[in-house]
Amino acid sequence: MKNHLWLILSLSLLSLNGHAIVMRHDVAPSHYIVNPGQYKNVVDLDFLTGTLIAPQWIVTAAHGVDPMPGGQTLTINQQEYRVSHILVHPEYNRDNQDHDIALLKLDRPVKGVTPAALYTQGDELNKQVWFVGRGYVGNGKVGVTGASEHLHHAQNTVSGTENLWISFTFNAPEKNALPLEGISGPGDSGGPAFIETASGLKIAGISSHQRGITSVEGVYGVSEHYVRVSTHQKWLNSSLQLTGKALAQASLQRPIYQAKTASQAEKTALIGSYRLKDGLELLIEACGNKLCYRWRDQGEPRVIKKSDDNLWFVPSLNRVFAIVRDSKQAITKLVLKDFRGERSAVKTSVNET
C-alpha cells in the first residue's frame, strides 16, 4: 500500500486467523510464553483480537469487522457468547485508518473474567507496554515464521504519541531492545497494548497497522501504530451506555441466518468446483457429516449451512451463497454476497474431492 502502510489483518487472506507475536531472534521463544489465564480478557475474534472492557463489551479494530457474521459466536473463559451488536467509530476513515476502533456488544455479561480498564491519561510517551497474542510467531530478522498454539506476550515502549495514535518501534538487540522486546503481527489487529499501572494493567492502545521500509511485517525497525484509547474514551464511554433504539441505530445492520436441516441430496447437488470471473476457484466439499467450502490452494475449509432452498451461509463469516438453477433444477452457479460485494461463480465440475 502507499507509504509502506499495510494492515495487520489482510481481508484477502482470511485463513490467517492466528495472532502473532514477533520476538527477538536472540531470545528463546519459550521466554515469551505465558499462562493463558494471565490474559483472560483478551478475546479471539477469529479475524481479529479484542479485549473485554466491560462485562458485555469488547473493543477491537474497525478495519476488521467487515468479515464478521451477524451473531458471531465467541468463546470466552470456556463459555460461548454471541455478538449482538457491532459499533464502528462514526469517524472511521478507511483510507488513512483514522479512528480505527470498534465495539462489540455480547448477548449477555461475561462471567469469571475481569474486564480491562481503560488508560485515560495522556502521558503514554516512553511508557512500556505488553502486547499479547496466540498462534503465528516470528523473529525480528525474518518476520513471521510459523504457527504456535501457545499464548505469548512481548514488551515494547511507546515511541510516539499523536492525537489519535500511539506508536512503537521494533528495536534490534543492539539498539537498546527490552529483554522481551517484540511487536505484533498478522491477526493481532484489534489486540491490546497494556500499560502496567499501580492498579494493574490498563489498555492504552488498539492494534491497527504497521509502517516500515520493507514489505515484510514484523522485522526490526518496523513502526507499529495503535489507536490511542485516551483520546477515544468519550466515544467509548458514551457507546457503552447505549441501549434500545439508540443502540440499534448506532450498530451495523448485519443479518443473522437460521440454520435448517439439509438433506444428503441437497448437499450432494452443491458439491463441486465453481470459478469466479477473476479465475479464483471455489470448492464445496464434504467435511465429515457437514458441508464446507474453501478456495483452491489457499485457506482452511469453512462450514456452510442451509438457510433456505436457495441460500447457504457461513456461520463464521459475513458471506452467503445464493444458488442459481437451470430449467431442470440443476445448480449452474453461485452468487456470493459478502463484505467484498456480490460476485458470481460458475459451476465447472461436480463431486470434487
Image: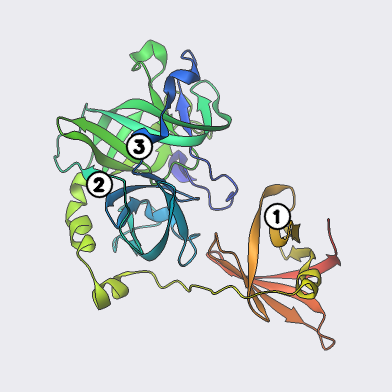
User: Label 1, label 2: how many angstroms apart (C-alpha)?
Assistant: 37 Å
Q: Local crowd at mark 3 within 10 Å, few (<14), some, or many (≥20)? A: some
Q: Label 3 amino acid?
A: Tyr
Q: Earlier in the sequence, mark 2 or mark 3?
A: 3
> Could you tell me residue 248's position as x and y percent?
31, 74
Residue at (28% x, 35% y) in the render: 194
Relative vertical location of residue 65 with respect to residue 245 in this rendering, above or below: above
Q: Which residue is mark 3?
A: 39
The residue shown at (54%, 61%) is 317
- For the point 49% across and 46% down, which residue is it? 9
x then y, percent, for residue 220: 45, 23
Number of numbered discs visible in the structure rendering? 3
- The span from disc 2 to disc 3 (Cα, nearest Å) is 25 Å
Q: Specify the label residue 164 is tagged with.
A: 2
Residue 100 seen in the current view = no
Residue type pointed to by label 1:
Trp
Q: Residues within 10 Å of mark 1 (few under 14, many from 20)?
A: some
Q: Using the image as rendered, state which of residue 140 and residue 260 is in the foreground.
A: 260
Residue type, mark 2 in image: Leu
Asked which quadrant contains residue 290, the reply is bottom right
Q: Which residue is mark 1?
A: 295
**Marks 3 and 1, how far apart in space?**
34 Å
Q: Of marks 3 and 1, which one's residue comes earlier in the chain? A: 3
3 and 1 marks in contact (CB < 8 Å) = no
Q: Secondary structure at mark 3?
A: helix
Q: Which disc number belongs to residue 83?
A: none
